[in-house]
Amino acid sequence: MEIKGKKVILEGKEANKIYNKGAYGKFHGKKLYLNLIEACYLIEKGRLEGNFKNFIEHATKNEKDFEIKYLVYRDLRERGYILTIDNHFYLYERGKRPPSPPSYIVMPISERAIFSINRLAKWLQEIEKKLMIGIVDEEGDLTYYIAKFFRLKGSFDEHEYRGEVYLLKDRCIVWDEKLIDALKEDFIGKSLNNFMLLSLTEAAYIGERGVKIMKDEKEMKDDEFLKYAKKIQPDIMERFTIYKDLRSKGLLPKTGFKFGSHFRIYDKEPYATHAPYLVHVVKRNYRCSWAEISRAIRLAHSVKKEMIFAIVEDDIKYIRLKRITP
């Protein structure tokens, strides 16, 4: 065994044996080149001779975030998967190996790393395979997520409306019985006996679809109403953008406050089913801790929903993050 910086080189029968029993490394000519992560695992398992402690020290100095990458690699190998390493980890279905195509690209990440929606979107744009993220916590335990661009589609039609709504302070009220009936049919607003309450986002939506929004007996223009709403709810434009996009896809957004998200999303009538999705609206520069992401996904899972992040930009993108057990 020869160690050269970030590579471990094997030759002869040992090289063939190592490769054949687990697809470790890559052959260049008659020499097998192992990544430090692969070699470290083989030393730990007793399949390569070497001082494990000394090798760990060497690898830590020569491979960025070695311990994080090693713990993810080790865990997936222990679960019976074959992984190859190039610029990324490539994971193969159980029972498969190169030259078969890999099923996932695996990104190893520390729980202390900062979650960036922009970085995640770039990863998804750049890779051709499904993306699996392996998070290593401070005790060395692993949590895995599948990330993908997600397409949403529902069964609701969009309609035009007629009538008036009245702005209170941080919501609107409807007295018009015909308008109330029309909104009830589309599950918009909250009906309370002989009147209906609308959120600012819902009011903005029906305002663009023919309803007059009144304040102090005067009609407010759409941009005037949104300017007012922004003072009450600073992120109203981002939420409204996603609300309209979801409605155009045949989906029904309702508040997701109880679940810690902006919207809960129905693809069928609310009385016939539960909301299968939670959507949280973020800007392209959104950053937070992975602990916050973990909490959001676990909460969504606990109420049988999927967690989706909606990125507001010229081209709206939806990213689903789902926890899995490999």
Image: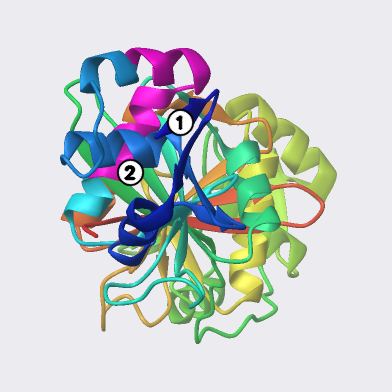
Q: Secondary structure at mark 1?
A: strand
- Please provide percent x and percent y for residue 147: 47, 56
For the N terminus, the quadrant is top left
Q: Is residue 176 above or below residue 234?
A: below
The answer to the question of whether label 1 and label 2 lie on touching residues, with beta carbons closer than 8 A, is: no
- Magenta stretch: give its range: 57-74
For the C terminus, the quadrant is bottom left
Amino acid carrying mark 2 in the image: Tyr
Q: Is 244 placed left or right of 57 in the picture?
A: right
Amino acid carrying mark 1 in the image: Glu
Q: Is 50 placed left or right of 91 in the picture?
A: left
Residue, disc 1: 2
Verify whether residue 62 appears in magenta.
yes
What residue do we see at 33% from left, 52% from top? 14
Q: Is residue 320 above or below residue 161?
A: above
> Who is closer to the viewer here, 121 or 58?
58
- Please provide percent x and percent y for residue 225: 74, 42
Q: Is residue 171 above or below residue 291?
A: below
Q: Pointer 2: residues within 10 angstroms few (<14), some, or many (20+)?
A: many
Q: Is residue 103 above or below residue 76?
A: below
Verify whether residue 255 appears in magenta.
no
- Please provide percent x and percent y for residue 41: 27, 39
> Who is closer to the viewer here, 266 or 65?
65
Q: Residue 20: in sight, yes or no?
A: yes
Q: Which quarter of the figure has residue 238?
A: top right
Residue, disc 2: 73
Mark identifier at residue 225: none
What residue do we see at 26% from left, 79% from top? 273
